[in-house]
Image (cartoon, helix red, strand yellow):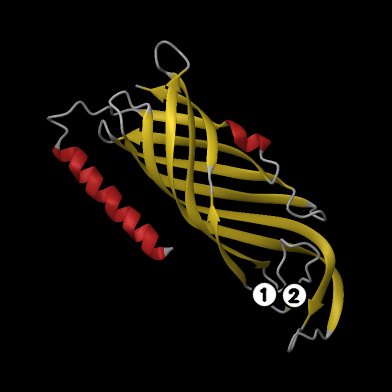
Amino acid sequence: MRYLLSFLLCLLVSESVFAQSTSGQTDVPNKWTFRFNVLGLADPLDGNISVGGEYSLHPNWSLTTDLSYLFYSSYISQNKGTSGFIVKPAIRYYTSKKRDRFLEATVFYKQANYKMEDWLSKDVVNSIPAYDEYKSFVYQKEVAGLNIQAGLRTDLSKDGFLGLEVYAGLGVRFRWQGLKNDPNAHYQRDRLFFNPLKQAYSVSPSAPFALRLVYCIR
């Protein structure tokens, strides 16, 4: 993940320099676009409120980011409450002069905290716990990854200030999960989501999809 972030940073810097060097020759749309992810509220797994923004560097290039707050999850049946966030910076390339089609590379980080009450295995040695304890605890999931996605944008108003975006893509995601701030305990899973290892780790493909309302400030 460190190498992916470094690559994205270098790409953003190079495009920023390119935009500045051509600003006198090209009509650069220096405007902010704010957006709201409509599907975030309807997410059955991790309900969230998601807002974001885009800043145009060049007629074809822009920088974007999305920030989400998690308020609900159905990953865990015993969940007493969920909190967390998602951060998604990206670089976007418009493939048409009308800026209605685009490709973008996105890196993301997600952290979800699940409040639980259940039995924990304490002081585990060679997979054998010294004792079990019923207590309240926080089970934490962290996900990071990279997506390449394509999308379409259409205007909903005649002046172009209000629009709609839809995109889909493919990528890879890396997941870590385990008990938060309790290194001497293990949680025995009763659903496939859980892994009893203290630092569970997995890699899997991802297929992002989103529908956004966008608002432009000229």
The answer to which of 203 and 11 lies nearer the viewer is: 203
Tell me where residue 15 appears, x and y as whole percent: 24, 45
Answer with the quarter of the image where residue 68 lies.
Answer: top right
Label 2 to label 1, Cα distance in Å?
6 Å
Disc 1 crowd, CA 10 A, few/some/many (<14, 14-19, 20+) = some
Residue under the image location 37 percent in, 30 percent down: 101
Residue of label 2: 186
Tell me where residue 92 appears, x and y as whole percent: 35, 40
Secondary structure under the numbered disc 2 in the rendered image:
strand
Residue of label 1: 198
Residue under the image location 56 percent in, 53 percent down: 110
Question: What is the number of the mark on residue 15?
Answer: none
Relative side of 38 to 134, left or right: left
Q: How many marks?
A: 2
Relative side of 190 to 195, left or right: right
Q: Amino acid at mark 2?
A: His
The answer to which of 126 and 119 lies nearer the viewer is: 126
Tell me where residue 211 appears, x and y as whole percent: 54, 32
Asked if residue 114 is positioned above or below residue 211 in the image, the reply reads below
Residue under the image location 66 percent in, 61 percent down: 140
Relative side of 162 to 175, left or right: left
Residue under the image location 81 percent in, 53 percent down: 77
Q: Amino acid at mark 1?
A: Lys
Q: Earlier in the sequence, mark 2 or mark 1?
A: 2
Relative side of 134 to 155, left or right: right
Q: Quadrant of the N terminus?
A: bottom left
Q: Quadrant of the C terminus?
A: top left
The answer to which of 205 and 112 lies nearer the viewer is: 205
Secondary structure under the numbered disc 1 in the rendered image:
loop
